[in-house]
Image (spheres, grey):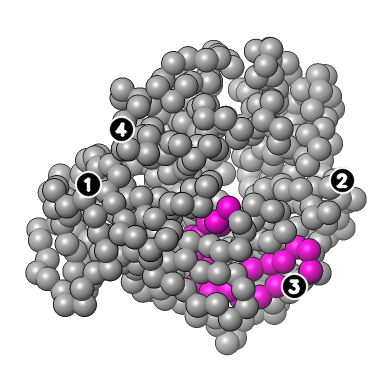
Amino acid sequence: MNGQIRFNPLNRLSFYTFFACSLLGLVGCSSPAAITSEPTAVVVATPSPDAPTATLAPSTPTSAPATATLPAPTDTTAPTDAPTISPLPTASATLPAPIADTLLFYTTPVSDPSGQAYWAFRTLPALPQLDPAGFDTLYGPRDRLEDFSMFLANFQPQLSPDGRQLLVPGLVSYPEYGVEGTGTWLWLIDLASGTARQLLPNGVIATWNPAGDAITYAEGATLYTLSTAAGATPQPLFEDPNLWSLYAKWSPDGRWIAAMSGIQDETTGDVTFTYWLVPTDGRPGREFARRVSLVGGFNATEVSWSPDGQYLLAHNYVYDLAGNQLLPTETGGLTWLPDRPQLYQRAEWLRILSVTGEEMDVVEESAYHSTINWAFSRDGRRLAFSQAPTDAGTPLAIHDLASGKTQIAGIVPDALYVSELRWSADDTLLIAGANHGEGRYDIWTLPAAPNSTAERLIADAVLIDAVPTVR
């Protein structure tokens, strides 16, 4: 990201509020209903309702209409006086044996000689290509909870489809909201060869193409693609003055990139969303759908393709490739199943829906959903999820999608809630990031079978993700 990126301030406030509530164990937090955007020097052009396509924008600006431009962050470059970091004396200093065929990403605090603690990027097993000088301060100071929550919401590492490369973005600066960037790049880590290099000088939010040899990202008013080959340069593919950098998603068949633009009305606070389908062969992008909404807790995961590439989930609405809205109304808490064009909903209760809203399966009827976490097994056959905490801790349940049965796998001891939940590469273990309150976080494992006993894997650490290792 650079100074041209439009950052939605409501995104930051909503997920900062969410993670501040969840990580600190607070209650009664809510997202703001609307925020007045600050002006920038970038001209905003209001999309015309009858303009179905957009191409590269002309260089001559036009006059700005009476709508608000979303503020842009300030570019941040790598600091020349980066602090010298040494690990904090915690139980995390001596790592346990790795989980078979599984690579864990997590963050743990490290400190410099002055005592300032930072959130550092770590892996289990440790990867020799991760130079601590580049990754110890990747997620910002430990006393800046909002910086870390920003990472969890939108800056997670992105594994390539073949599982051999990893994108790791740093955190950019948003001084108008009191967020200091970490001065880090977008890193490309080759898990097979053991090399790491700086792919871009900004921590952009990028997604892979299906072949795993190129990425796409939005920066400023432009949607780019970039080959991961050495020496490649970004290629502009589409331009709109109101692009949001969170939503650039390559389709599973490689033919399209879904992008989104938005303009917020200063008076009402409403945002006009325009979704675009941009062909990857260079043809003009076309308007896919449009709607007006009061902005809430949006993050990068809320625009996604179905596994077969035939449908797009955009802020709890489902569309086919012709732009037809399939769900009759907005249905909250939706995520695609990993192996089929069906939807998992976490709302009034946990259930599986068709793309038209038909109920396919009820996972659990429960009033407890505020801090629930969940994960599908890698074969797509089982769904693990956390339940309401008890005096003993937080139970983890497993729902079999074929039989419709749910069983309790076990309890994460003394956990107020589970912040992240993943499966091991062979689907035999559940890996849970637990919050114990008072700033205590750790990572647990639990056999994915009934009546199992959880074991603590890493202390003083927050789980980010777990992926299969390269074979």
Q: Are marks 2 and 4 in contact (CB under 8 Å)?
A: no
Q: Residue type at mark 4?
A: Asn
Q: Which residue is mark 1?
A: 272
Task: Find the magenta span and give its range.
Answer: 187-210
Separation of residues labelled 3 and 4 (CA atoms): 45 Å
Task: Tell me which label, 3 or 4, sits earlier in the chain.
Answer: 3
The crowd level at tag 1 (other Cα within 10 Å; few <14, some 14-19, many 20+) is some
Please state if 21 lies on the left or on the right of 237 as rendered: right
Separation of residues labelled 3 and 1 (CA atoms): 43 Å
Q: Which mark is residue 324?
A: 4
Please state if 319 lies on the left or on the right of 182 as rendered: left
Residue appearing at x 64%, y 68% in the figure = 188
Q: Is 346 located above or below residue 434 in the figure?
A: above
Task: Tell me which label, 1 or 2, sits earlier in the chain.
Answer: 2
Q: Which residue is mark 2?
A: 100
Q: Which residue is mark 3?
A: 195
Task: Tell me which label, 2 or 3, sits earlier in the chain.
Answer: 2
Query: Image quarter for residue 384?
Result: top right
Spot occupied by residue 396 in the image (x, y as percentages of width and height): 70, 26
Q: Residue type at mark 1?
A: Thr
Q: Quadrant of the C terminus?
A: bottom right
Task: Tell me which label, 2 or 4, sits earlier in the chain.
Answer: 2
Spot occupied by residue 288 in the image (x, y as percentages of width and height): 30, 44
Q: Residue type at mark 2?
A: Ala
Q: Residue type at mark 3?
A: Thr
Residue appearing at x 50%, y 37% in the figure = 306
